[in-house]
């Protein structure tokens, strides 16, 4: 996954693309600079089919003592997933699809970097593979997904 991405598709476009029965979110404002630690739209498997919801971008493993570890765990390499303790158990148990309609790569020109938005020619939303976990604060409080 990248370091920044966009989601400007409507709930209906997302429902159509991914076969969702219920609208995935109520806030329909376009988001053109989704960054790590923000809430992101994701689809997970549930007992009764696919379920969408908001997850925090930045994996906090359930066994972590400090949620700040999630600030650094924003991307994973497919070739090393089975080796990393934070990821290996989640591959089978907690995969998700992170919904986007564009992402940024940076073009360098000397010292200047220019963001280049990459999207499907059709403009349709797409999914990026993700993993999620549920973290409970040691002192109590609401879980972070």
Image (spheres, rainbow, N blue to C red):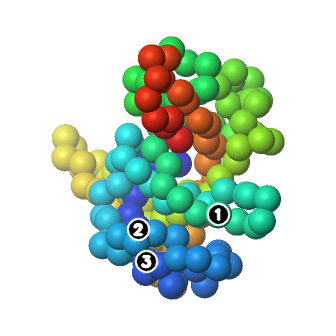
Q: Circle 2 — which element?
A: strand
Q: Position of residue 127 (x, y in %)?
A: 59, 63
Residue 4 position (above or below residue 66): below
Along the viewing direction, whichever of 79 and 137 lies nearer the viewer = 137
**Of pointers 1 and 2, the one earlier in the residue sequence:** 2
| Alpha carbon distance from label 1 to label 3 | 18 Å
Q: Residues within 10 Å of mark 2 (few under 14, many from 20)?
A: many
Q: Neighbour class for label 3 at 10 Å: few (<14), some, many (≥20)?
A: many
Residue 139 lies left or right of residue 38; in this view the side is right
Is 105 left or right of 120, judged from the image as shown?
A: left
Task: Confirm or deny contact between disc 1 and disc 2 (CB under 8 A).
Answer: no
Number of marks in picture: 3
| Residue 41 in the figure: left or right of residue 116 | right
Find disc 3 in the rendering and name its residue: 9
Q: CA–CA distance between discs 3 and 2? A: 6 Å
Task: Of the two numbered discs 1 and 3 on the same chain, state the one appearing first in sequence.
Answer: 3
> Residue drawn 38% across and 42% down?
36
Q: Position of residue 132 (x, y in %)?
A: 61, 42
Badge 1, how many Cα within 10 Å: few under 14, some, many 20+? some
The one nearer the camera, 38 or 139, is 139
Q: Decide: marks 3, 2 in contact (CB < 8 A)? A: yes
Mark 1 near mark 3, Cβ–Cβ under 8 Å?
Answer: no
Quadrant of the rendered structure where residue 61 is? Answer: top right
- Residue at the limit of the structure toward the front, as seen here: 140
Residue 144 is at least partly visible in this image:
yes
Rendered residue at 53%/63% (across/down): 99
SS for dot 1: strand
Residue designated by label 1: 51
Instruction: Say the numbered circle drawn on residue 7.
Output: 2
Tell me which residue sits at (61%, 37%) in the image.
133
């Amino acid at each position: 996954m990248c370091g920044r991405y966009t989601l400007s598709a409507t709930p209906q476009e997302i429902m159509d693309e991914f076969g969702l029965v219920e609208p995935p979110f109520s806030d329909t404002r376009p988001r053109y600079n989704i960054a790590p630690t923000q809430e992101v739209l994701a689809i997970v498997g549930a007992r009764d089919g696919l379920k969408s919801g908001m997850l925090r971008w930045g994996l906090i493993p359930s066994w972590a003592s400090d949620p700040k570890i999630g600030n650094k765990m924003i991307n994973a390499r497919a070739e090393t997933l089975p080796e990393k303790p934070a990821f290996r158990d989640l591959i089978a148990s907690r995969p998700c699809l992170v919904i986007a309609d564009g992402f940024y790569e940076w073009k360098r020109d000397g010292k200047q970097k220019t963001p280049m938005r990459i999207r499907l020619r059709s403009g349709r939303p797409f999914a990026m593979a993700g993993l999620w976990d549920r973290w409970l604060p040691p002192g109590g409080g609401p879980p972070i997904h």
